[in-house]
Every structure is written in C-alpha cells, then in structure tokens.
Amino acid sequence: MTEPDVTARPPLWRVVVAVLSLALTALIVLVLIPRAARSGWPEILSSLTSTSPLWVGALLVVAALAALIDTAGFRRCFPGVAFGPALRTNTAAGALSAVVPLGSTLAVTLIVTRMRTAGLRRSVIAAGTAVASAADILTSIALPVIGAALLATSARITGGTAAALAVGAVLGLVLLAAVGALAVNRRVVAALLKRAQGIEQGFSEGFGRSSVDFTADGAAMHDESLRIARAGGGAAVWLPLLARILQAAAFAALCTSAFGLDVTVLEAAAVFALGRLLTLVPLTPSGLGVVETGMTGALVALGADASGAAAAVLLMTITQTLFPAAVGALLLPTGAGPARE
C-alpha cells in the first residue's frame, strides 16, 4: 500500500466542503465569540496582545509536552515502531483531524499506510488503530465527566444546576465503566460479531452476493486489541487523557494568573474539560469556533471578565490546536522514515 499523496488535487466536493467549513468557522469566530463574551473585538484583541511572551512560551512548551505524552500512548498502540516516526505520524494525523473537514478519515488512512511502511502486520495495524480510536473516545467522554464533577463542587453553582452536573458526572462514569466492561468481555464481543455476521449475510443474499465470514478475524482482532491495550499498564489508553489533563491545568493557570479572571483554578479546568464535548460537534473541523464560543460563554457566566475570557480561550486554541496543526502539516510530506526499533 502506498502512502496517500497529500499534494494531489482533492475532488471538487471535498474542496467545496472545506471552503464551506472554513467559512462557517470564520463566521462563528468573528460573530459568536464576541457575543458569548459580551465584548467587542478591539477589547478582546487588546487583552490578547497584552499577554506576556513568557506565557506564550510556556503554553508552547505545554503543547510540546502534551504531544510527546500523547505520542507515547500512540506508540504503545503499534509495538515496534520507533518514537520519532510515531511522533511524526501522530502529529501529522492530528493536523488532518484538527483543521481539515472530514479529516479523521484521512488521518486513519495516513496512520494505516505509515504503519504498513513500518513493516507491521495487518492484524497489528487494525488492532492498534482500534485501540488508538478507543483511547480518543475514552478521553472525549472522561474529560467532560471530570469537568462536570469539578464544576458541581463550585460555590457559584447551586441548586438544580449543581445537581444536574453531579448526576451527569455519575452517569458518565457509569457509562464508561459499562462500555469498558462490555469491551473486554469476549462473550459479548463474540455475540455482537455473530449478530453483525447475520445482518451482513442477509444483505448479501438480498443483493445476490456471496457472504464474507468475518467473525474469526473479528475475534482475533479483539484479542490483539486487548493485548495492546493492557500492555504497559494500559498506557495506550490513559496517556492521551493525561495529555489533556496537562492542558486543562495550563488553561486554569492561564485564566487565573495570566489574565487574572475571577474564577477558581477548578472552575477554569472544568470549563476546559467540558469544552472537549464541543469538539464532537460536526459543524467545523474538531469543533473549531464552537469550542471557543462555548468556553468563553461558560467563563463569562461564572463571572470572568469578558474580553479576558475570550482572549484566554483564543490563546489556548492558538498554542494548543493551531500551532501543533501547523507543525503536523509540515510533517505530512516527510513520510514514515525508518520506523522499526
């Protein structure tokens, strides 16, 4: 399998989707963020440009550390791949997911082809990709659960809102535990595969095609995925979450120390964690614009200064999303390189 040519001209429909998505992102940023902040762009930009360069540098260091931690987990998904190629692949795939419409599919394709270049077996690549995707989903659920729990303890959140956040955190925790228990249960997976095989066979017969038996391969892939996920104490699963927790701590420090916002450290960290839910909104790549609007509105609702809240959120996006995406874009043409340890 050859690596996709990232310089090739994309199909027209993808160009149209990209243009519309970027236009929507710009509209959300330019119009909705000031409304969420209840402030104007001159005030927001004034707060943003007055940030100390030391804070900008510190946030870039945090972005680098988060990338290294995340790559350490990513590398665990593909045993035998050296750290350098894993870092290049993970960063490039992250760039596709972060700023390209429908980029997640391209990111998976990039990962698969580069792991093939590294000489990994197809079964290992399939299982590793499944574990990496599961870790990403786990992080997307676990962070908001943590955020809801933290925000429920805030003195500014009372009554029904606090109760709803607490119930949401408990339900999220129960959901994580249930999904985890089902995912590691071989009997449950075998039953699901058998059911899926029956559906596939019915479709094949209806369209006059021969059915393909994938239950054995699916069971083998499940076993391989569990082996990878359990290796190193489950590092492939919890390291990506650790990287996001580091960024949440950095955001809390930025809000309370750099911008002096009238929120507590736990409240700011909770806003960052809950904001990860908005990355799932499919309007823009990785929820760009939507995330910033939601986080800004939440900080202002907690009593933070309007322009400072918007500036803090935008600075986090620039340093933690756009800067790594730019680095990843530069790494796209580099290829996998010598990948084996």
Image: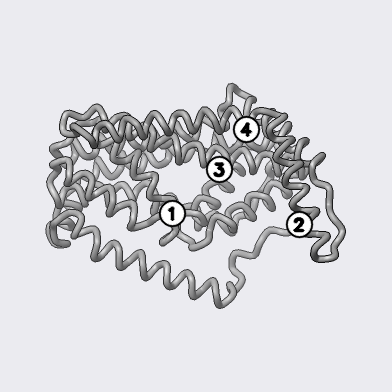
| Marks 4/2: CA–CA distance | 30 Å
Residue drawn at (19%, 32%), measured in percent from left and top? 159
Secondary-structure class at tag 2: loop
Residue named by callout 4: 183
Q: Nearer the viewer, residue 233 or 119?
A: 233
Label whose residue precedes the other's in the sequence (4 or 2): 2
Image side of residue 206 versus residue 36, left or right: right
- Residue 125 falls in which quadrant of the image? top right
Residue 332, horizontal then vertical, whole percent: 56, 57
Residue named by callout 2: 1
| Marks 4/3: CA–CA distance | 28 Å
Say which amino acid is labelled 2.
Met
Say which amino acid is labelled 3.
Leu
Residue named by callout 1: 286
Label whose residue precedes the other's in the sequence (3 or 2): 2
Marks 3 & 2, CB-CB < 8 Å contact: no
Say which amino acid is labelled 1.
Ser
- Front: mark 2 or 1: 1
| Marks 1/3: CA–CA distance | 20 Å
Residue 32, horizontal then vertical, whole percent: 24, 61
Secondary-structure class at tag 3: helix
Residue drawn at (41%, 50%), measured in percent from left and top? 279
- Front: mark 4 or 2: 4
- Could you tell me which quadrant the N terminus lies in? bottom right
